[in-house]
Amino acid sequence: MTTDYYSDELIESNEQENDFSYAFDPTLIEQQGHSLVVILEAKLCPNGQQKLNTSDEKITFKALRKIFREQCAGAQDFLSPQHPILESAVRILLSSKTESLKLSELHSKISALWLTSTWPRHMSKDAMRRVLDNATSFGITRV
C-alpha cells in the first residue's frame, strides 16, 4: 500500500518536472528570413484580418498578438481538428492570454480539439513534447 503511494507521488513529481512551458518567439521566424507579419496575417481569423485592415496602428508583433487574443481566441474555426499539430500549437500560443503555456495545457487543449474530429486521434504528452522541442521553424520555443 505504501509503495503505491510513493510510486504515485514519484510519477506526479516527474510529471511536474517535465511539464515545460512553451512560447511563440517571433525572432525565430525572422532569423529564418521570413516576414513575421506575412506569416501571422495568414493565421488570423476573418474578424482579426478585418481589424488589422481597419487599424491605423503600426503592425508589430505586440499589435498582432493583441488581435489574436481579442478577435480570434474564441472565433469559430480558428482552431480546427484538421490542422496539423504545430499549426494548432502556434494558434493556441498566439491567442493565449499568457505569454507561455505549460506542456500539459497545450496537450489537453490539442487533445480536446482532436476529439471533435470525425477521425479522433491521440498523441502522448511525451510525443508532443518531442515535437514541440523541435518546432523552432514554427517559432515555438521552450521557456
Image (cartoon, rainbow, N blue to C red):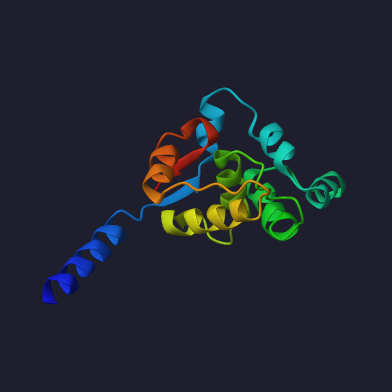
Q: x, y (%) of residue 4?
A: 17, 71
Image quadrant occupied by the N terminus: bottom left
Which quadrant would residue 59 be assigned to in this image?
A: top right
Q: Is residue 66 left or right of residue 19?
A: right
Res 100 visible = no
Question: Is 21 situated above or below 85?
Answer: below
Point 48% across, 48% down: residue? 23
How many callouts does the rendering have? Answer: 0
Which of the two residues, 39 or 75, is positioned nearer the viewer here?
Answer: 75
Q: x, y (%) of residue 104?
A: 43, 58
Q: Is residue 88 left or right of residue 52?
A: left
Q: x, y (%) of residue 136?
A: 47, 33
Which of the two residues, 122 or 135, is positioned nearer the viewer here?
Answer: 122
Res 102 visible = yes
Point 69% across, 36% down: residue? 37
In this view, the residue farthest toward the left is 2
In this view, the residue farthest toward the top is 33
Q: x, y (%) of residue 29?
A: 55, 31
Point 71% across, 32% down: residue? 38
